[in-house]
């Protein structure tokens, strides 16, 4: 589904939704019990329902700058065998949604993965004649060097299938550029280090004509973590670091004009962070 579009100066950002659902987030943020979520009144109606069940999404963001089109995170992908039943062997309209939004896959110049988890690398490849091939054939794929070096050694475990079907085929095709956590990608786009969820995790800052937006990646998963920075996400590899990253980023963003675009936030997906007593709130 083609979702929201935001304009930040000369940069247009388009959301392509793979999955949006209520309920699955409680697995990711175990501390966010329904009764506690209901206490955060501003989450309703966009980010939780009346029962305190959290809403979440998996989407890609197409960042259209004057000199290039960049896809930030590529969701789960079609035809992939995955352990989570709701993510297994998906058959979505993701690629035709790209075309419908005006961005056929051939028009993409860069693919940027905020980190190399299963729901961020899936459409790096697609299945053609039984083989995994790079989906965005004209793109350079930007993998964080720290991130890639961390995960490429995980081939023997649960991570192996992901490396094999979504990460290494692009590397083996010679389409990967390893980037630093604070890399400047082009005049309007730079990475911001946000470690903790994974070792090389980066967020994406967009700045143009005095306007700005930040694509979070997974340094938080749900807006309830603005109210509770100490609520960890179960896949955070370094929880104290992830909490420190959230606190530091919130401090910077609160009260600023920067639009915060959440990588797993349900519709409307973006808002401005404001200080709310001892903690924070997202105004949408
Ligand atoms: Zn994720």
Image: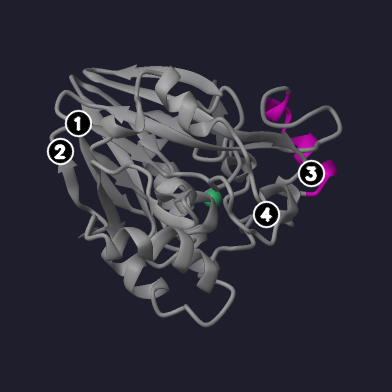
* Residue highlighted by disc 1: 68
Which quadrant of the figure contains the N terminus? top right
Q: Give the number of the mark in front: 3 or 4.
A: 4
Sequence-earlier tag: 3 or 2: 3
Prevailing SS of the magenta stretch: helix
Closest to the observer: 273 or 178? 178
* Residue highlighted by disc 3: 36
Q: Give the number of the mark in front: 3 or 1.
A: 1
Q: Is residue 43 magenta?
A: yes
Q: Label 1 crowding class (10 Å Cα cut-off): few <14, some 14-19, many 20+? A: some
Sequence-earlier tag: 4 or 2: 4
Label 2 and label 1: CA atoms lie apart by 8 Å
The residue at the point 19 percent across, 32 percent down is: 188
Q: Give the number of the mark in front: 1 or 4.
A: 1
Q: Which residues are magenta?
A: 33-44
Q: Report the disc number at residue 28.
A: 4
Closest to the observer: 41 or 15? 15
Q: Label 3 crowding class (10 Å Cα cut-off): few <14, some 14-19, many 20+? A: few
Label 3 and label 4: CA atoms lie apart by 15 Å
SS at circle 1: loop
Q: Is residue 27 visible?
A: yes
Q: Is residue 237 above or below residue 211?
A: below
Sequence-earlier tag: 1 or 4: 4
| 273 left or right, relative to 6 | right
SS at circle 4: helix
Q: Give the number of the mark in front: 3 or 2.
A: 2
Give the image location of residue 140, x and y in percent: 22, 48
* Furthest residue in direction front, as rendered: 129
Label 1 and label 4: CA atoms lie apart by 34 Å
Closest to the observer: 33 or 25? 25
Asked whether disc 3 touches disc 2, contact meaning CB atoms under 8 Å apart, the reply is no
């Amino acid at each position: 589904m083609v979702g929201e579009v935001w304009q930040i100066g000369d940069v247009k950002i388009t959301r392509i939704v793979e999955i949006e659902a209520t309920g699955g987030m409680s697995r990711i943020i175990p501390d966010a019990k329904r009764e506690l979520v209901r206490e955060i009144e501003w989450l309703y109606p966009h980010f939780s329902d009346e029962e305190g069940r959290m809403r979440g999404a998996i989407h890609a963001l197409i960042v259209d700058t004057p000199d290039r089109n960049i896809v930030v995170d590529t969701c789960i992908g079609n035809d992939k065998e995955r352990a989570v039943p709701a993510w297994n062997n998906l058959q979505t309209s993701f690629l035709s949604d790209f075309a419908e939004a005006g961005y056929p896959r051939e028009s993409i110049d860069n693919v940027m993965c905020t980190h190399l988890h299963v729901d961020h690398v899936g459409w790096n490849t697609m299945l053609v004649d039984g083989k995994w091939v790079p989906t965005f054939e004209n793109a350079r794929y930007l993998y964080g060097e720290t991130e890639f070096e961390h995960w490429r050694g995980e081939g023997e475990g649960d991570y192996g299938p992901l490396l094999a079907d979504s990460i290494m085929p692009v590397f083996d095709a010679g389409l990967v550029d390893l980037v630093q956590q604070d890399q400047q990608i082009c005049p309007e786009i730079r990475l911001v280090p946000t470690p903790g969820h994974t070792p090389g995790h980066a967020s994406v800052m967009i700045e143009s004509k005095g306007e700005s937006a930040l694509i979070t990646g997974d340094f938080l998963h749900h807006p309830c973590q603005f109210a509770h920075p100490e609520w960890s996400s179960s896949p955070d590899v370094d929880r104290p670091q992830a909490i420190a990253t959230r606190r530091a980023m919130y401090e910077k963003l609160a009260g600023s004009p920067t639009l915060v675009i959440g990588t797993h936030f349900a519709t409307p997906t973006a808002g401005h962070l404001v200080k709310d007593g001892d903690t924070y709130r997202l105004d949408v």
